Image (tube, rainbow, N blue to C red):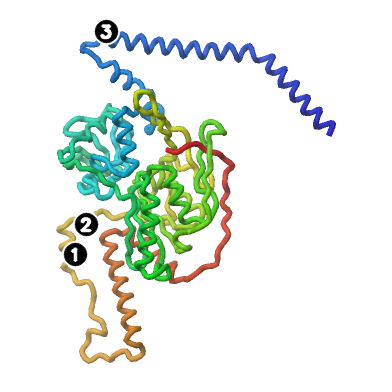
Amino acid sequence: MKKLLMAAAGGTVLGLVATTQFAGPLIAQTVNADSNVYEQLDLFGDIFERIRQGYVEDVDDKKLIEAAINGMLTSLDPHSSYLSEDDAKDMQVQTRGEFGGLGLEVTQEEGWVKVVSPIDGTPAAGAGMMAGDFITAVDGESVLGLTLDQALELLRGPVGSEVVITVVRGETPEPFDVSIIRDTIKLTAVRARTEGKAVVLRVTTFNAQTFPNLEEGLKQQIEDAGGIKNVDGIVLDLRNNPGGLLNQAVFVSDAFLEGGEIVSTRGRAAADGDRYNATAGDLAGGLPMVVLINGGSASASEIVAGALQDHRRAIVVGTKSFGKGSVQTVVPLQGNGAMRLTTARYYTPSGRSIQNLGISPDIIVEQPMPIPADAAEEESTTPKSMRSEADLRGTLSNDSLTEDEIKQIEEDRARAEEAANLRDEDYQLAYAIDILKGLHALGPQVEVEVDVTVTDAKAATDN
């Protein structure tokens, strides 16, 4: 005990000595740093006044200051920015699930506007815009050199008006124009349907409606199927989902997990962190799950996919996700504007950050490009199947099965044919449903304990 007390006392003494010895230089460094900051602010004020007095045209002081603020924020990373009063109102409307525009989630890369994903059921999706497209001009005006907010202003406009976007896509050598009619965007956060015996939950965004929509949609599909015993599994389709609210990603993940960490966020300081854990209860009753992702799956989508993957709750299928692993906090400012500031990174339960890396699927499945109409017509003229024994005249009947058993076989065959037809329409989804069929056919498996290493970390705030 005496040794411990002495060690503590020694530490205290050393601390005091160190403080005494280094207080002078530390104070001097702080004063110098503050002095440099004030000099830079004086420089800013000097430039501001010279612009006001000497620029070739009159300038709007408010716009000039807002541009300077936005330049300061956008220099940090692509997701930090200044929101004017109108932009802040637009963002609040979007998180509620209804807004005007084209239906594109975009970011900025090397000066160009890059499409993160088109939103299902919107004019942009209907016009054929794809994740990864680069927008180089809007109505003939180049977006190079514009801030992201300035580019968005060009894309916005009255409902019913036309905008022509110049697009560069993948390996296509030449840019091409896409004409889109602006419309009011009404987002249905989750669309639920049944394909064969698989319930498909298509999650288009993470707004305030997401978890309620998902819970209600899943419940309805299970009821329509006649109970959970008649369902093979769940497909959670997060493709082209640009993300949204962090708390909704936590709710959706929690819906299918019985416990454990969902996500942690870490800021610059150790105290600026948090960890979100699942509570008991699985809406899917332990049914097998497949999560579909692609290059348009970002942010909140990646939180859900990463949590379900790390806990071995779902098989992740598709292509690598977008790789946005940062958290933005919206801070209200004077004049009803706001600042969107990146305040933390988030980490999956195993402690991995997906920033710039994305979520890697367990099974990589590319989505084939659409077949041209003329090729599709040519393919449809080819015979799909050959004659079988049942087509021969005078063939023997099968007397080993009852009529009900034969009817069941025919129904199963019809479902299999529907699944085969789905491959032409949506190959990735058909692949996911095939996986669920295989898992269901195997029956309940022996549960294997999986050690998910969780890094001891804390986190920050909602984005």
149 sits left or right of 346 in the view: left
Percent x, y of residue 120: 27, 49
353 vs 11, nearest the viewer = 11
- In which quadrant will I find the N terminus? top right
Distance from the alpha carbon under mark 3 to that under mark 1: 70 Å
- Residue beneath label 1, please? 379
Marked residue nearer the N-terminal end (1 or 2): 2
Tell me whether circle 1 and circle 2 mark residues in contact (CB < 8 Å).
yes
At a point 36% along the width and 45% down the height, the residue shown is: 207
Placement of 351 over or under 11, stated as above or below = below
Percent x, y of residue 227: 40, 69
Placement of 186 over or under 147, stated as above or below = below
For the question of whether residue 344 can be seen, the reply is yes
Percent x, y of residue 84: 31, 27
- Local packing at callout 1 (Cα closer than 10 Å; few below 14, some 14-19, many 20+) is few
Name the kind of residue labelled 1 in the image: Glu
